[in-house]
Image (spheres, grey):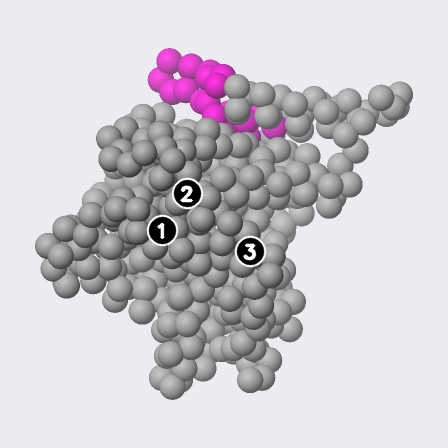
Amino acid sequence: MQKYEGYKFDIRQSLIGVQFLFVAFGALVLVPILTGLDTSVALFTAGLGTLAFQLITRKNVPPIFLASSFAFIAPISYGVGKWGIPATMGGIVFAGLLYVVLSFIIRVRGDKFLHKLLPPVVVGPVIMTIGLLLSPAAVNMAMGKIEGASYSGGDAMIVSGASLLVTMVVMMFGRGMLRLVPIFCGIFVGYVFAVALGMVDFTPVLEASWFKVPNFSAPVFELDPILYMIPIAIAPAIEHIGDMLAISHVSGENFLKKPGLKNTLLGDGVATIIAAFFAGPPNTTYSEVTGAVSITKAYNPAIMTFAAIASIMLAFVGKLGAILATIPAPVVGGIMLLLFGIIASVGLSTLLKHNVDMNDPRNMIIVALILVSAIGGMELNFGIFSLSGIGLGAVVGIVLNLILPRTKHYEGF
């Protein structure tokens, strides 16, 4: 296949689109499984979000697929537990609106302000907190310490160990398309072990109908979850730039110039808002799919249209949703041990890649207070609203970066 030549609708490439959905599938459904959302809704909103993104960037559509964002796993889990799904979705609507606001500021002022407001010394530790905050939950799920669990801790460790081991092996030694689906492979093998150990009840699958409308629900807007969720969008907004650089390199086309960040960031924001209005997880561009584009040389964005349509159609297959609902917690718990550690490592690599000088007292202060305020359980209550967790850490980092003077001279530690 040739390099990127723009959007060309070709029905013969529909099977390639289904292949790309397979690449994204494991990560796509993992987020709702971990956060208590409906997997069928996530499939539906991933497809709808991708189509919305393509519509917004129609002049020069990047060949990408949008689906469940890992950056929101911890915030959604916290929000669902504290405020419920509707209020959490209301917060995510406003997180999506932050993308939209940023896209319009970029449209007016260019993208340099974004790097000034959110330098690596802020973004790096914020990403680290996303991975570290849920690490206790990952350990508990892997060990089977789940309320109402009908299996032993020993069985749980066998299953979580199997899913973790397979995921690591595929990540390290997989070749071609196989290397792009480590999460899917880990879930599959862990599920097989769980079935063999009698941890899976197939009754809901047998009782489920083939056609079922996903459990859509509307958002509810409350101030606390809104203020909690808005700062969360900072990290994936920055990550979006990296995703656009990657697909530009793969496709041989500068998507940061055309359609430009002002449109791609707007597309991500609109896709996230749409997802929240159906009670689906926020959408983001998938690096797994970008890797698949690189391997297959399938640069036609219309392929992602077919992937999106297939995702929407699968959302209404009731038995698929029932099967996904039977996956025991230890299956994904093993993968979470690795996943949340990787997210934290990405934050650390952000600091290293941009040569952030951690001997500089200014940088040390910013990183230290972001980590401690986010992970330590600090909460600032202002009466009508409160800030805590990742949102508080992000706000602390942004404020400190704006008010702390640059260090003119310091003695190395």
Instruction: Give SS at disc 2.
Output: helix
- Which of the labelled discs sits on residue 44, or is there none? none
Q: Residue type at mark 3?
A: Val
The mark lying in front, picked from 1 and 3, is: 1
Q: Is residue 330 left or right of residue 412?
A: left
Q: Is residue 114 left or right of residue 389?
A: right
Does residue 49 appear anywhere in the picture?
Answer: no
Q: CA distance from mark 1 to mark 2?
A: 8 Å
Q: Earlier in the sequence, mark 2 or mark 3?
A: 2
Q: Position of residue 259 (x, y in %)?
A: 54, 65
Q: Which residue is mark 1?
A: 193
Q: Residue at x 51, y 49 (%)?
A: 165
- Which of the labelled discs sits on residue 158, or is there none? 2
**Is residue 382 covered in magenta?**
yes
Q: Which residue is mark 3?
A: 169
Q: Position of residue 327 (x, y in %)?
A: 30, 48
Q: Earlier in the sequence, mark 1 or mark 3?
A: 3
Does residue 297 appear anywhere in the picture?
Answer: yes
Instruction: Give SS at disc 3.
Output: helix
The mark lying in front, picked from 2 and 3, is: 2
* Dot 3 crowding, Cα within 10 Å, few <14, some 14–19, many 20+: some
Q: Is residue 251 above or below residue 126?
A: below
Please state the extent of the stretch shown in magenta in the rendering: 377-397
